[in-house]
Each structure stands twice: as C-alpha cells, then as structure tokens.
Image: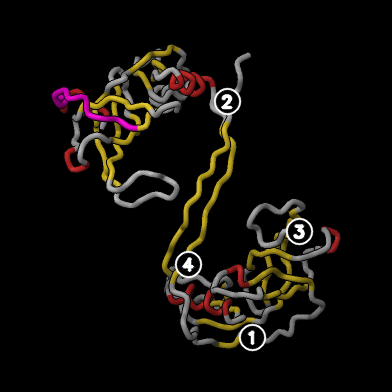
Amino acid sequence: MPDVLSAPLVVEFPFTRSLGPVQSAFLTGLRERTVLGVRADDGTVLVPPVEYDPVTANELGDLVELAPTGTVTTWAWNPSPRRDQPLDTPFAWVLVRLDGAGTALLHVLDAPGPDAVRTGMRVRIRWAATRTGAITDIACFEPYESEPDGAEPTPHTGEFTDPVTGIVAPARLDYVHTPGRAQSAYIKALEERRTVGERCPSCRKVYVPPRGACPTCGVATAEQVEVGPRGTVTTFCIVNIKAKNLDIEVPYVYAHIALDGADLALHGRIAGIPYDQVRMGLRVEPVWSEGARHVDHYRPTGEPDADYDTYKELV
C-alpha cells in the first residue's frame, strides 16, 4: 500500500468590521461594565442587541441596561479547552438569559465540573480585569445564588466617552489535510517537475489538479494525462496588498493559467515581466524553486500570444 500523504494546514486572517450605533453601544458598554440590550417591536429585550427587528425588519435603537445576573437556559461541558478559548481550565458553554432579557447570550461558565452545572442555575458576570470593548470583556459567568428581582431594564442612551467604532476578530482554522488517490498522484508528479491531470471517461476533458471525479459529469476519473509544462494566461489580477509571511514584493500578478492539454485553468504567479504588461493570452512556462516540490512562478515564453478562441472556454 502506498504511503498516505498528509500535511497540517492553517487558514488564518483578521476579520475587520465597522460597527453601527447599536453594536457600538453594546461593546463600549461592556468596556464600562454595562450590559445593554435593545427592545424589539414586540417589547422583547434582545441581548446581544441587533440593529434590525428579526420579525418586522424595522431598525431598532431603544437601548436598555440589564443586570449582570441571569439564568442558564442550556449548557454543554467542555473538558478540553483549546487555544484562545476564554478559559484554560475545563468549563461549560452556556446560554444565559440575563434578568429582564427575552433572549440568551452565549458565553462560558467557570464551574468545578459538569455536576456543578444545571439548566436553571443562577449566574453572574465576572468582568475581565482589562477591558477593550469586546465580548471578551465578560471574562466568564460564575455561579451566583440569587433570585430574579423582576425589575424592568432601565432605558439607556447608548452614549459613552470614546465609543468603540470597529473591531478586529482573528479567524483561524487548523486542520490536517489528507489528499486522495488523484491528488496524491498529482503531488508526487510535481516532485518530478511534471504536471498530471485526469481525463473524464465521459466528456473526455482533462482536469488539473485532479479530484478523482469529473466536476461536470460526476463520474470517477482514473486515466492520468501529463499536461503542460507551458500554458496560456486566461485571466489575471494585480495584487497590491502584501500578504503576511509571503516574501513577494507588491504589486505582482496572480493568474489563471490553462496548461497545454488541460481543460481547467489553475492558479499561478506571473513574474519575469512588468506587472502592467501581463495580458490575457500571454504564453508562459513554469519556473521551479530550487529543491521545492512546486512551481514558484510562471514566466513568458516569448511565443506569440494565444488566440482568444483557443482559451475562451477556460476564462
């Protein structure tokens, strides 16, 4: 049996968004140890607040302040916290309906074990020592023996000094990728500086990289076909923003390249030509990195540009 290929992969990027008046007030309030909700058209207090009524779609802005106490409506125990989760010891994920609210807030509960958690238990907010205007300003919830006082939430203007107007939330996905038969053959061919695809037995199209099945016909593919190494730029974009951990100076060109003999364009960087001279139909060839298992970039071959009719189906 051939060796099974696998590799750890990480997808990570900062998600940046601006805040409207309702979300701005909510996050700024957390920084000031104040929990705000918004009253919906039917009188229900929504926490976290939203900017539009989920039923009528009307814009909302009637903010109210709630107590930092509430009731657990449901929960799930997390015995093995992961990196960057709110607590580094086992905890419970909980939905907490704050006193006076009509909806529940998702957060974590610091408890000694699952036997100490139950639906209906009373809890209160434990505030973070350092607060910046984020949901993490609530460090967690903790058990709290009390009874709801039945008091109505008090109106709040939502006005604070130095309001939070935007947030940056890091998004990260760690996983291990194991390619199948077709992709493994493709990767191993790259070690020999060859590019192979697979031909569909029905439509006869050659797909690169192969996936083991034809995306058009849905039938399995097995016949390997070597393509390229030269190809044609079908379309491209000019990149002007430098990516983290990518040692390539901007601007540079990233393109779809239809390798000779392939019926699907693959991605590749274009170099060896000024970025403003790259064009559709440009004929290119691969440049391999020394000791690497992949093409570093594609460069012009010096051939005449390909006629549009020869690659129009691949744009």
Q: Earlier in the sequence, mark 2 or mark 3?
A: 2
Q: Earlier in the sequence, mark 3 or mark 1?
A: 3
Q: Amino acid at mark 2?
A: Leu
Q: Residue at x 61, y 72 (%)?
A: 137
Image quarter of the N terminus: top right
Q: Determine the secondary structure under disc 2.
A: loop
Query: Over which residues does the magenta segment extend?
Result: 297-307
Local packing at callout 2 (Cα closer than 10 Å; few below 14, some 14-19, many 20+) is some
Numbered tag placed on residue 62 in the rendering: none
Q: Is residue 76 visible?
A: yes
Q: Tell me how far mark 2 sits from mark 4, CA to CA.
A: 39 Å
Q: Is residue 145 left or right of residue 254?
A: right
For disc 4, the marked residue is 167
Q: Position of residue 292 (x, y in %)?
A: 45, 28
Numbered tag placed on residue 5 in the rendering: 2
For disc 1, the marked residue is 152
Q: Is residue 306 magenta?
A: yes
